[in-house]
Image (cartoon, rainbow, N blue to C red):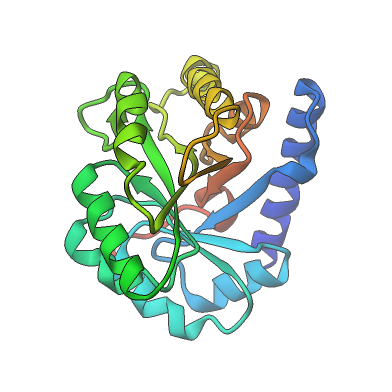
Amino acid sequence: MIEIKNNLEIIQSKIVKACERSGRNPAELEIIAVTKTIDIESIDYALDCGINSIGENKVQEIMDKYPKIQKPVKWHLIGHLQTNKVKYIIDKVDLIHSLDSISLAEEINKRAAKLSLIKDVLIQVNVAEEESKFGIGYDEVDSFIEQLQGFDNIRVRGFMTIAPYFEDPEQVRPYFRRLKQKFDEYQKKELKGNDIEFLSMGMTNDYEVAAEEGANLLRIGTGIFGARNYNV
């Protein structure tokens, strides 16, 4: 368990240095601990070490873990969300990072309305236009947001992207920089149902570059908990 604490201290130190390089305030950034396949004991320990947000890729893992985590924590759905799974997590997660279609927006809006909720979402943008990844294209963002104006129970809080994987994290910088430009653009706009605050970029391999380029939500799993054993 002490390894988790040590890993977090290293990550936080690197974030501080990245912020110093880019003239940012480290207090403006939040680590989302990605807890895919991670046991409850390890998650609880990470919360004791100062983590306030956890991110899950799969609805089923949220369903399994949600009643077992007793400590105060914000839940983030960071993986692809199917419309038929929205009903299971609509009242459990604080932020959905992966809104990428109007059909999904319709379902989130419908389920949120039934519970008198305003559901916070991020629009997932496939900045690199990789066929293997979900998300709308960068050039579709404006029209997509325009279509969302009619949904009274959805609040767009910002954007999320998953950058291509490169051995050299410097190679992802242009993708992060491009989405930050769109984020800045929408922070200045006054649109119904928009309260742009969050830019979710950066994972274990590239979170330092993401921090330098303006991300304020960093999704880090392996860097905190170590390599996962997916056969367990």
Image-quadrant location for residue 17? top right
Q: Is residue 46 left or right of residue 225?
A: right
- Residue at x-position 48% and y-position 24%: 179
Residue 168 in sight here: no
Residue 31 in sight here: yes
| Quadrant including the C terminus | bottom left
Q: Where is residue 74 in the image (x, y as percent from the top left)?
A: 57, 66
Q: Position of residue 156 (x, y in %)?
A: 46, 45
**Closer to the camera in the image, 166 or 178:** 178
- Residue at x-position 39% and y-position 65%: 37
- Residue at x-position 53% and y-position 36%: 202
Up/down of 115 relative to 93, above or below: below
Up/down of 153 relative to 87, above or below: above
Image-quadrant location for residue 21? top right
**Closer to the camera in the image, 201 or 10:** 201
Q: In this view, does 101 lie to the left or right of 18?
A: left
Q: Where is residue 39 in the image (x, y as percent from the top left)?
A: 47, 73
Total count of labels: 0
Up/down of 144 relative to 166, above or below: below
**Closer to the camera in the image, 112 or 192:** 192
Up/down of 87 relative to 196, above or below: below
- Residue at x-position 67% and y-position 52%: 7
Q: In this view, does 145 lie to the left or right of 102?
A: right
**Closer to the camera in the image, 75 or 170:** 75
| Quadrant including the N terminus | bottom right
